[in-house]
Amino acid sequence: MGYDSNIKSSRAKKQQRLTLIAIVIGLALACVFAVNFLRRPKDTGSTNARKNNNNVNLALQAKMRQNGGLASDADSNNNNSNKKQLRTVVKNNDLEMETAQAQELVSQLEQKVRAIKKTGVIMETDKESLALTSQLQDATRTLIKLRYGDFDSSIHPTPYRIKLDLEFQSTIPDFDTKGKDGTIVIELAPISLIPYSVYNFLEIARTWKKGAFHRNAGHVLQAIARSDVKQSMPFQEYSKEYPHKKYTVGYAGRPSGPEFYISIQNNSRAHGPGSQQQHNPYEADCIIGTVIQGVEDGTVARIHTMPGKEFLGDKKKWVLIRRMHILVPKDDGSDEYVEFSSSPLVIPDD
């Protein structure tokens, strides 16, 4: 009897020790789990995003300081100004990215349109061609607004203008009395009608290198154009709402451009639909805009006095186009225009 009770007592103590050991092990495991949980890595995605944003902001701040546009951190009075300028830089960067994306889309669509034109199909009646050229026109309108400014069409239906600085050479008959300088301003056509023609000429003006009026015909004054625009138009863009009337400006050739001309008579039939070829009754010269300065003061008429007719081989008889300036409406609701860009003063050698 006493022996049995001793055995039971020994077993009970052993059971208590095992229970105590299990509790200790459980507590230890719980502590390890808690420590690991508290020390787990943070969300790397959000952390990296914050780091990237901080890096961008620091880079922008450095860029602004380098350009003298951002005050130092020590100048606490300019903190609000700094933030405003930073927002402007970020906005400009976003605009540059959006413009680049729009340019890429226009380039892709342009190549598709050129490929269709090479097939010889009459694009003005072909459904696939019409759909694709419509997409190109829509994309081009977006690109123009991003690159050159978006203006209220109810106030400025034709907001983009190009100013040409001319140089008359000593061979012009009235050189001794009127000198060498002259100016022409072209108001580009509405982009609602012929956006790609307008965009193409804006690009010619923006990247202008040199050129000259070198053809003195009875119906047009034609000019050579040297810029980054090397190719002709991807298709013969034309609108019956903007015909080749007197003093309009159009692209020369079929396919048209980059050379251009001023019509010195009504060329609606000579350069309009069905002209200069028999294959396509709808095809016309692409049009650009209208001369709004240079007619009344006699500048256009003076170009027409270049010595000789048609294409002039002697470069000394040409009227040089020294510079091109892009003009856009002033941002104050007025009718005034301001310079958006201008080509370099230095004329490159041949």
Image (cartoon, grey):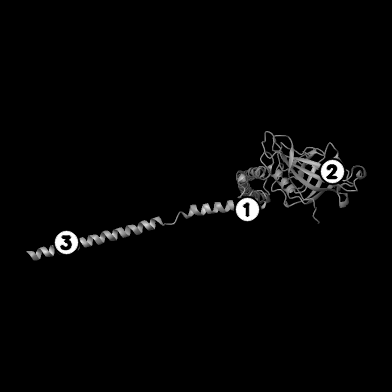
The x, y position of residue 152, in whole percent, is 66, 36
> Residue at coordinates 73% horizontally, 48% vertically from top-left?
206
Instruction: Estimate how packed mark 3 is, as few (under 14), some (14 to 19) or many (20 or more) residues with alpha carbons within 10 Å.
Output: few
Q: What's the distance in space between the residues labelled 2 and 1, CA to CA?
A: 45 Å
Which mark lies nearer to you, 2 or 1?
1
- Which residue is disc 1 drawn over? 62
- Which residue is disc 3 drawn over? 12
In the image shown, does 333 or 39 lie closer to the viewer?
Answer: 39
Give the residue type that dot 1 points to.
Ala
Mark closest to the chain's N terminus, 3 or 1: 3
> Residue at coordinates 18% horizontally, 62% vertically from top-left?
13
The x, y position of residue 185, in whole percent, is 78, 41
In the image shown, does 246 or 200 lie closer to the viewer?
Answer: 200
> Residue at coordinates 25% horizontally, 62% vertically from top-left?
21
Specify whether residue 262 is in view. yes
The x, y position of residue 133, in whole percent, is 65, 45
- Which residue is disc 2 drawn over? 182
Mark closest to the chain's N terminus, 3 or 2: 3
Q: Could you tell me which quadrant the N terminus lies in?
A: bottom left
Q: Is mark 3 on a helix, strand or loop?
A: helix
Specify whether residue 313 is in view. no
Locate residue 251 relative to residue 173 in the image: left or right: left
Quadrant hosting residue 159:
top right
Give the residue type that dot 2 points to.
Gly
